[in-house]
Image: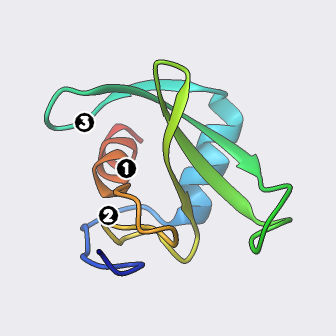
């Protein structure tokens, strides 16, 4: 099993700037380097240990495939040990 926040990805923008950018744009359609189509949106978490925190959620075909909180930004795996780095990289390069 993978550890939370395992691995790193090189990003040019901060989590806060990515979250703000998405909030201004709404849901944005993107593609990973492997050409996987997904959408990203900025929200505030309502439940769980991150309740009240900013989050960037990543969707494929209307199903959530990953999310990134500020503490996850720049890591390949998020707090839930879900791969999210490829989504963060695609968002970061589009900004």
Give the alpha-carbon distance from disc 2 to disc 1, as whole Å. 6 Å
Q: Residue at x 37, y 50 (%)?
A: 92
Q: Which of 23 and 77 is in front in this view?
A: 77
Give the residue pinned by disc 2. 11
Residue visible at 61% across and 63% down?
16
Distance of mark 3 from mark 2, alpha carbons?
Answer: 14 Å
Q: In which quarter of the image is residue 15?
A: bottom right
Q: Label 3 belongs to which residue?
A: 32
The structure residue drawn at horizontal position 78% and vertical position 56%, both measured from the top left corner, is 45
Instruction: Identify residue for label 1.
Output: 92
Image quadrant of residue 49?
bottom right
Residue 58 image offset from top left, x and y in percent: 50, 40
Q: Residue at x 34, y 57 (%)?
A: 83
- Which quadrant holds the C terminus? top left
Above or below 36: residue 6: below
Q: What element carries label 3?
A: loop
Q: In which quarter of the image is residue 24?
A: top right
């Amino acid at each position: 099993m993978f550890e939370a926040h395992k691995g790193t990805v090189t990003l040019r923008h901060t989590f806060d700037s990515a979250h703000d950018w998405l909030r201004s744009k709404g849901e944005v359609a993107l593609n990973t380097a492997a050409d996987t189509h997904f959408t990203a949106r900025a929200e505030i978490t309502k439940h769980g240990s991150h309740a009240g925190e900013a989050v960037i959620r990543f969707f494929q075909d209307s199903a959530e495939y990953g999310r990134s909180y500020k503490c996850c930004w720049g890591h390949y795996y998020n707090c839930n040990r879900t791969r999210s780095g490829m989504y963060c990289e695609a968002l970061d390069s589009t900004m």
